[in-house]
Image: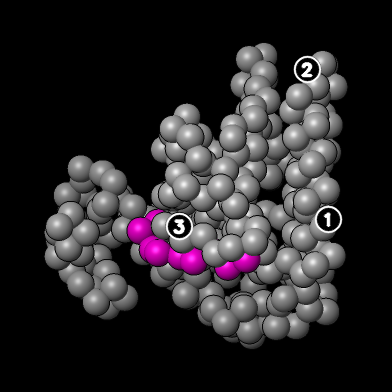
Amino acid sequence: MKLTYSSLKDNDIFILTNFSCQPSQELLNDRNLYKILWSKKVSTNIVVDDYNLELKPNEVIFCTPLNIMEVPMDSEDLLAIVFNKEFFCIQTNDDQVSCHGFLFFGSSQPPIIQLNEKKSADFENIIRLFKEDLLIKDHLQGEMLRSLLKRLLIQSTRMVKNELPQPTIPNAQLNVIREYNILVEKHFREYHHVKDYANLMFKSPKTLSNLFPKFSNKTPSMVINDRILLEARRLLLYSDLSTNEIATELGYKDPGHFSKFFKKHEGLSPSVFKKSKQN
């Protein structure tokens, strides 16, 4: 299945698929697409950034264009919503859906939500409306699809927030965490220390460290390290850059410091890691 909306004028695209055909599989190689995958009644095994991941029944995962994915063609129970930033810009709509920093911020661990029976029915209804509107070709089609996507993102964001260690964390504190995640996404190549981001936010490192346990089990430094590691793995696996070139790309003046950092967290040197994945 592959139902598509696109506009040459706006260069936007929205697709509903299950990746069961070759044209939909080719979408996984497009580095400009957001992807929402819902495994409905059975578990689905996928690969995200070279990590094997089992999506359990009624689990939904949210991936950015940064996430490199592999999805088997026989996953007919899977439903995927695929769109580009021209169709729905996460940043532009952030004030409305509050999803940048919760659902899509380039995390090395894309968020996964578990749908209960009611939420599953809600999602099923939205998917049904998507299918109906993807068959209606008129000048209102794009706006209708965008409004449905916005509705799905709002519901998903609420579920993510309810699963926080402290679901009642004040919005002002949530906004600090979201801003931190966004800044790391923008500057992880140049800033590798919490104090750098604390300065950008006019906060103290201690303030950030005390705040993060309310949001997740990650510390501010872990967010930085995970983002650097994610990019390092991608470059090692999917580029022709040497280890020294990757070190430079990630802001390390001394390639040895990068290699030491990578081995500490991955258990293998960059070169050994790359060779192990090629075999």
Callout 2 environment at 10 Å: few (<14), some (14 to 19), or many (20+)?
few
Residue 62, quarter of the rendered image: bottom right
- Determine whether, in the image, residue 41 is placed left or right of residue 232: right
User: Sequence order check: which comes first, mark 1 or mark 2?
Assistant: 1
Name which residue type carries label 1: Asp
Q: What is the quadrant of the N terminus in the image?
A: top right
The residue sitting at 57% across, 82% down in the picture is 217
Pointer 1 local density, CA inside 10 Å: few below 14, some 14–19, many at least 20: some
Q: Quadrant of residue 270?
A: bottom left
Mark 2 sits on what residue?
137
Residue 186 appears in view: no
Q: Residue at x 57, y 43 (%)?
A: 18
Q: Magenta stretch? A: 49-57
Q: Nearer the viewer, residue 132 or 14?
A: 132
- Disc 3: which residue: 46
- Residue at image location 83% in from the left, 79% down from the top: 168
Which three-letter amino acid code belongs to the residue tagged 3?
A: Ile
Left or right of residue 143: residue 59 = left
The residue lying toward the viewer, choosing from 259 and 19, is 19
* Place of residue 236 in the rendered image (x, y in percent of width and height, measured from the top left): 25, 53
The answer to whether any part of residue 258 appears in the image is: yes
Are the two marked residues, 1 and 2, in contact with CB atoms closer than 8 angstroms?
no
Where 94 sits versus 213, above or below? above
For disc 1, the marked residue is: 122
Q: Position of residue 105 (x, y in %)?
A: 58, 56
Is 73 left or right of 101, judged from the image as shown?
Answer: left
Q: Are marks 1 and 3 in contact (CB under 8 Å)?
A: no
- Is-magenta flag for residue 166? no
